[in-house]
Every structure is written in structure tokens, then in C-alpha cells.
Amino acid sequence: MQTLSQLISEASETPLPYHFGCQLQKCVQRLTKSQKPYHELELVDASGTGSLKVWNNHPQFHEASALKPGAFLSIEGTFTKNQYGLDAQDWKWAHLSEDAREEILLGDPELKAKQSEDWDTIEKLCSELSDPRLHSLCNTFIKEFGERFRRAAAARKNHHARRGGLTEHVAQMMSTATAVCVAYPQLNKDLLITAVLFHDSGKLWENNYPAQDFHQTYNLHAEALGHISLGIELVNKLWGDIEKEHGADWKLIAPPSANVKIHLLHMIASHHGQLDYGSPVVPKTPEAFALHYIDNLDAKMEMCELAYAESNKLAPQISEKRFPLPGNLISPLKKYDKNNF
């Protein structure tokens, strides 16, 4: 089977045969401009999300109204993509068997291999931290929450909005932070790497997936507090637990532990960069500015990649605007190749 993201990126006005497995997020009944009913299926798999319309002349139109959120489906047919999104002809769906469902939950092998490498990057960079307080904090977090972390998305939409997306986002940010610290050696690398790990740690509750599901859950704590507040609370809790064991040793370390913690908490609190973007405080340290821009850069690179793959082409080299990017995208310039003559 192929993946949903492959279909969305490869589909065009030319009909394309495709077969993929996915999970139904929800089925919504809508009306066309001529008041004819149709169903819109919101679908998800390990690679991402998409939607598909079931028109009222489809043989399974009436069956669609009985579909329950969470159902695992096999979808096969001929697909096209236009300005309104995916469309299909001569297509059908069936419920997946238990074995096929388990295979779908394992995800696309290529994506899973990448996420495994990304997790190795996170563990490696955290293990190399020289500040014993930040080293203990990161390793304790990874041991206690690693499995949950690897299931989480970085968002519900826009960027890395898939199972394991948070691992991809954080690993890339850590790699970027490492490079930035080479260009700006005055930055506290241990602090920046730690803040990258924890900046979205509240999304372990805000954007998480159950072990056997592709549907992001909703959580009372996440809805009531948001991921920034949860991240601050989590760091305070872990720090307090570790300090009970190592506090006496930490008193001999400079800078003081209280200063290290408050700088880390400030970075988590300010990483959205602006008060109107949800941060309770704006960045006020070099590391806080660096974290904000590294986070924003990685999100924008992912948004561009998705837009190139999924948006309609308005003209050669021009792709239709995809929210929240500010305008239509121009195709990137290919790298110079001295052998290409």
C-alpha cells in the first residue's frame, strides 16, 4: 500500500491509480451549491492527513453516513487533484482486517526509519551536555517520557502534524542549534539544546496519539493550560525531583542552579516570540532569541515542503498559497551542478 501523503503530493489533473490504508478522523455531511448532499471524509495515516469527498452518486454514499470515527479503511481507485483538493473516480473502500490495521499503524518504513534516526540524534546530543544539571534533566525526561514523546506531533496542522512529528521537529532544531552555536560561540549550547528538547514538551499532552491510533486526543490539562504552561510545569517538577537527590552537589557548581533553571523556563515561556502568538513573555536573552528563530525556521521549512507537494500549481514554478505562509510560493532554485552541461 502507498501512503496518504504520497497520494496528495503525486496526484494531479491526470488520473492516478492508488491504493492506501488510513484511519477515518470524521465523516461530515455537506451540501453542494446546488444543495446536493455529499460526505467529506477526513483521513489520517502515519504520513499526514487529507480529505476525500463521497458524492451522492457514489455506490457507497449511504454507507458513508454509517462510518464511525476511528475506523481503519482500505481505499482504492483512480484519483485526481484540482483546486478543491483530492477527487476520485471508480473508487471504493473497505474496512481493514486486524493484521492490515497493525501494518498501517507501523507506518511508512521510510518515514519510520527517518524518525528513528532523529530520535538517535536527540539522545546523542542530550547525552553530550556538559552541565550536569541540564544533562540529568534531559536524560530523566527521555527515560520517563521517551515513548510518549515519540508518538507526539508538533502541531495539529500546518507543520509536523503527524505521529512522530515532534521527534522530527526537535531533532532538526537541535541540528540547527548546533550549527548556530558554531557561528555564535557566545551562546550557551547546553542551555539551547535543553530548551529545544523542552520547548514543546507540553505537546506530549496537547498533540499526542494513543498507542494504537492515528487520531490526536484532546486533554483537559492541555486545553486548560496550553503546551507552554505545561512545559514550564513539567520542567519545574522534574527539576525539583532531581534536585532532591543532587542538590548538595549542585551548590558547588557555577552558575547557580536557580539561574540555570530560570533561564530555561524563560526560553520555554518566550519561544513563540510575541505575546499575541501565545507567549506570556517576549525573548530577553540571546538563547531565547535563538530558540524562537530556530523553531520558526524549522516550521517554515516544513510548511514550504508541504506546500510544494500539496498545493495547486497556478503557473509554471508558482504554487498556490498555503496557510499560514504569507503568499504564493515560487519553486526553489536548483543547486548549481558543474557537471550538468
Image (cartoon, rainbow, N blue to C red):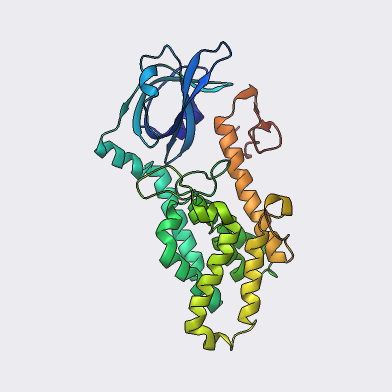
Q: Position of residue 296 (x, y in %)?
A: 65, 50
Q: Is residue 119 left or right of residue 190?
A: left
Q: Is residue 192 left or right of residue 141?
A: right
Observer-nearest of 173 and 56: 56
Question: Which quadrant holds the C terminus?
Answer: top right
Observer-nearest of 325 and 339: 325
Q: Position of residue 157 (x, y in %)?
A: 55, 41
Question: Which quadrant holds the N terminus?
Answer: top left
Q: Position of residue 246 (x, y in %)?
A: 50, 84
Give the number of callouts. 0
Q: Position of residue 131 (x, y in %)?
A: 56, 77
Q: Is residue 105 left or right of residue 180?
A: left
Quadrant for residue 3, please give it: top left
- Residue beneath the point at 45% across and 57% down: 149
Q: Is residue 12 above or below residue 322?
A: above
- Residue beneath the point at 71% across and 37% down: 326
Quadrant for residue 69, please give it: top left
Q: Is residue 34 above or below residue 259?
A: above
- Residue beneath the point at 50% across and 67% down: 126
Residue 49 in sight: yes
Observer-nearest of 299 and 202: 202
Q: Is residue 168 left or right of residue 322?
A: left
Quadrant for residue 314, please give it: top right
Q: Is residue 137 above or below residue 160?
A: below
Q: Is residue 40 above or below residue 221?
A: above
